[in-house]
Amino acid sequence: MSETAPAELTREDREELVALGHAYAFAADARDFEGFAALFTPDGVLIPSRGRYDGREAIAKGVSGLRRYDRTYHFVGQSRFWVEDGVVRGETYCIAHHFTETEDEGTRDRVMYIHYRDVYARHEGAWRFAHRTLGVVWAGQEDKPDGPS
């Protein structure tokens, strides 16, 4: 069961919310899809650029689509958080690299500049994503013939 939102966020709340965003990126890059889904409330919602995943099982299955890349690297940027009408909200910027190795062309890097819009809830004493919407600000392909260094 999710807990009631605080009237104001403490410094500790903000630090935990930043850490939640970092854990999301680490879990995605480590291909820990069950751990990724556990960062959401049991009825949490993830809305990527295409589709919608409701609940942890659907989120884990949906994010497993990252397997089509040889590796990913999510760099989490600035975040901000606030309480609005009894709901904890936030937004976070991210630059995500999605690498594919090819024999002919070397390394391909699908780069995405992402703006997450979030609703958070405390679940069993920890902050979790209740709802996360992924907005792609820009995406493009870079070819890196020399491969990873």
Image (cartoon, rainbow, N blue to C red):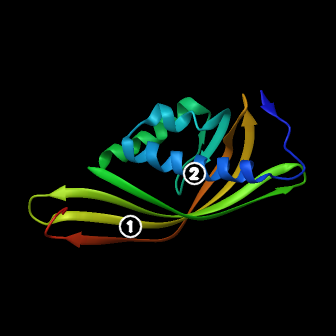
Which residue is pictured at 54% across the width and 49% down the height? Answer: 51
Name the residue nearer the viewer: 22 or 69.
22
Instruction: Choose mark 2 or mark 1, whichever is in front.
Output: 2
| Up/down of 109 relative to 51, above or below | below
Name the element at disc 2: helix
Going by the numbered disc 1, the residue's amino acid type is Val
Q: Is residue 141 visible?
A: yes
Task: Look at mark 2 in the image and give the residue it sits on.
Answer: 21
Which quadrant of the structure image shows residue 45? top right
Q: Which mark is residue 92?
A: none
Task: Please tell me how crowded label 1 is: few (under 14), some (14-19), or many (20+) other residues with Cα within 10 Å.
Answer: some
- Inspect the image, locate mark 2, and give the three-letter code of the amino acid beneath it: Gly
What's the residue at 38%, 40% (across, down)?
Answer: 31
Q: In screen coordinates, is 17 left or right of 149?
A: right
Q: Is residue 96 left or right of residue 68?
A: right
Whether residues under marks 2 and 1 lie with C-beta atoms below 8 angstroms apart, the answer is: no
Which part of the image, by quadrant, shows the N terminus? top right
Residue 76's x, y, as percent? 51, 60
Label 1 sits on residue:
111
